[in-house]
Amino acid sequence: MRKSLVEAELLERAARLFAERGYSATSLEDVARQTGMSRPALYYYFKSKEDVLARLVEGLIASSELALERIRAESSGQPNERLRVAVEALIGPIVEAPSRFRLLITYEAELPDLLARRYLDIRRRIVREVGAIVAAGMGSGIFRQADERITTFTVLGMCNWVAWWYEPSRYRDVGGLAAEIAEMAIASLRVDGGHEPPADPGALIKAIRGHLNRLERLAKS
């Protein structure tokens, strides 16, 4: 248990260093110095700088796999609700480790071949799943007609960009943040621009309360 906690902290600090200085410009000794640990002690946890990068990527790939499973579990729902689940699922791993995500996006070209292929594979599968949701939404008339590929990458871009501005100390309600971004994504794609009226007054009141609750959570975060 202690080893796992120490490794997690070391990986997080290493990711920040790699993201700030660049992977090539950062040595394992720099990582050791940043963590207040001697280089020999650091070797107890990691074999090399390449091992650190590999562990960072492995963790993000695993998180992305879980997000993909969550998206697929909602395959029978309506496109707008499926998109909501997809956006919230994809944002989850990003807000858990924004510095790692930035590192992966920025230094993708420096990944070892095997890791690069695995990372590319998970990215392609995510694009296919989100693309299928977009296509279903357009086909059913829920989403406005547009280029499916551009629309898909626009939605994914909304998710990925969170890694560059998210601050844990400022946005404490991660669930509320993800829900708000998901709502923005759906509203931008719906034929009516996101102003679809509920079927009855009770549903209208419920919808208004939902929006107010989200805004209140964000205001307090």
Image (cartoon, rainbow, N blue to C red):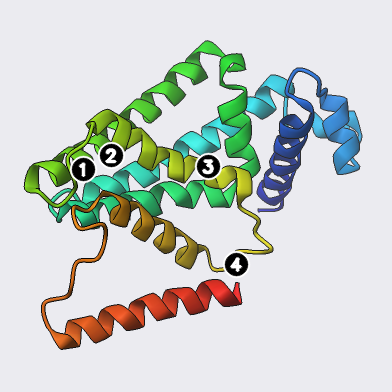
Q: Nearer the viewer, residue 53 or 110?
A: 110
Label 3 crowding class (10 Å Cα cut-off): few <14, some 14-19, many 20+? some
Question: Residue 132 location in percent, x, y?
Answer: 20, 37
Residue drawn at 44 percent across, 74 percent down: 214
Is label 2 in a helix, a strand or a loop? helix
**CA–CA distance in space, label 2 to label 3:** 16 Å
Q: Is residue 23 visible?
A: yes
Residue 130 numbered mark, or none: 2
Residue most extreme to the left: 140
Label 1 crowding class (10 Å Cα cut-off): few <14, some 14-19, many 20+? many
Proximity of marks 3 and 4: CB atoms separated by less than 8 Å: no
The residue that mark 3 highlights is 161
Amino acid type at image mark 4: Arg
Q: Is residue 188 left or right of residue 37?
A: left
Amino acid type at image mark 2: Val
Q: Is residue 168 left or right of residue 137?
A: right
As displayed, is residue 91 above or below residue 46? below
Proximity of marks 2 and 1: CB atoms separated by less than 8 Å: yes
Q: Is residue 44 visible?
A: no
As displayed, is residue 81 above or below residue 36? below
